[in-house]
Image: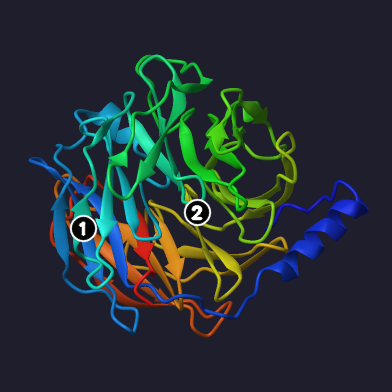
Amino acid sequence: MFRPLVFSSLATLAVLTSCHPTVERNVAGPAPNAVYFITDQQTTGQIAALPIETDGRVSAGTLTPLGSGPPANETELSLLSAQYSIIVVENYLFSISGGSNTLNMFEIDRSDPTKLTRVGDAVTTEQYPISVAASLKHSLVCVANAGDSIAGVACAAFDGKNGIGKLDAVRSYFTPESLPATGPFNTVGAIFFNNQETALYTTIKGNQIAPAGTFISVFPLNNGVVSRTQIANYPKDVQFLYGSQFIPGTDLIFATDITNAAVIDVDSFSSAVTEYVTTIPNNFCSCWTAYSQKTGTGFVSDPLNPYIAEIDLYKNDLISQPAASAGMLDIAAAGNYVYALSVGTATDLLTEITVFDVSGGRGTIHSVQTFAPAGGSVYSQGLALYTGSN
């Protein structure tokens, strides 16, 4: 069932083992207060904000206009297959808008986190923005785009008064094989900062045929400035790195890989060593990831399969795989809960948020609610949680 784990050395095993206790587990951490996703409908793009009750369940919320329409065509829609199209950093929310090639910033009302107030103007990006990362430490936001002529990342300063500044020149990941680029293959999987916020990482999907095509892009920071020189690392035994994130307190990236989940050690900017690849039975496309502080485990969703997989991040092990009502796109975890987004089709516009309870610790995940919020559509995407009201 599982691909064997091969350690590059005993030293690697020792490092990986030492990383394990750095993350305090079985402690839920801050409880979530609101969940957000983007819903690009036919007339205007919106951010859906749903309040989260003390029992983890969601209820009807608000819709805040993004001021843009849906993706213009199927090419643009396919390119939105990336993690982190919407993120929350402290009490700020950042969102891309695929229908207008813009990056947006909102302030979250601490007393009512479903109330969003735009900060500054929307900032124009390169074509096809698909993933965003923000560093509170450096007051820096970066957006990855699939590109019309190149695929790359641009960054800008932000503050709570003026919003996002002018994006700098794009740093290239690679030149797309076709113009415009087509997804989901050979496009950005996710953009994110490492735990120390000393480098900007991006997973680049391959095409499944040429495994060397997938890589991890690294742009180090120097005094808060993102380097213009890319370091490209090609970890072995993976073919299609997609949704990804750093495991808190470690230099390990938890990522999806076709129908699998992978853990990759990036203990230096120029190194990426695949430590684990766990096969997930019945998965058609492992896409998005989430980490739960409560369980100390990772979770993987599949848009074509109504199951969520729980992965042991320090052993080559699938812990559980409970069912939901539909395949799931983006997922996020906080407190005692994991949240998942399922979207509708061209004929069925129903969008659902599924709430999973993990309060019993690892191996206990189970669904407690499926909620269909207003405003959902085939263009719904992204998922972010706010925990700042605690």
Q: Quadrant of the N terminus?
A: bottom right
Looking at this view, name the residue that lies furthest to the left: 43
In depth, the one of 242 and 324 nearer the eye is 242
Looking at this view, name the residue that lies furthest to the front: 161
In this figure, which residue is indicated by the disc labeled 1?
Answer: 116
* Quarter residue 352 falls in: bottom left
Relative to 79, residue 89 above or below: below
Relative to 24, residue 103 above or below: above
What secondary structure is found at the residue carrying circle 2?
A: loop
Q: Residue at x 61, y 25 (%)?
A: 230
In the displayed structure image, the side of residue 19 where residue 357 appears, left or right: left
Residue 23 position, x and y percent, is 66, 69
In this figure, which residue is indicated by the disc labeled 2?
Answer: 283
In this figure, what is the number of numbered marks? 2
Q: Residue at x 34, y 24 (%)?
A: 126
Specify whether residue 327 is in view.
no
Q: Mark 2 or mark 1: which is in front?
A: 1
Does label 2 or label 1 sit earlier along the sequence?
Answer: 1
In the displayed structure image, the side of residue 67 where residue 36 appears, left or right: right
* Quarter residue 125 falls in: top left
What is the crowding at mark 2: few (fewer than 14 residues within 10 Å), some, or many (at least 20)? many
The colour scheme is rainbow
Specify whether residue 22 is in view.
yes
Q: Are marks 2 and 1 in contact (CB under 8 Å)?
A: no
| Amino acid type, label 1 | Leu
What secondary structure is found at the residue carrying circle 1?
A: strand
In the displayed structure image, the side of residue 351 where residue 202 appears, left or right: right
| Amino acid type, label 2 | Asn
Residue 345 position, x and y percent, is 21, 48
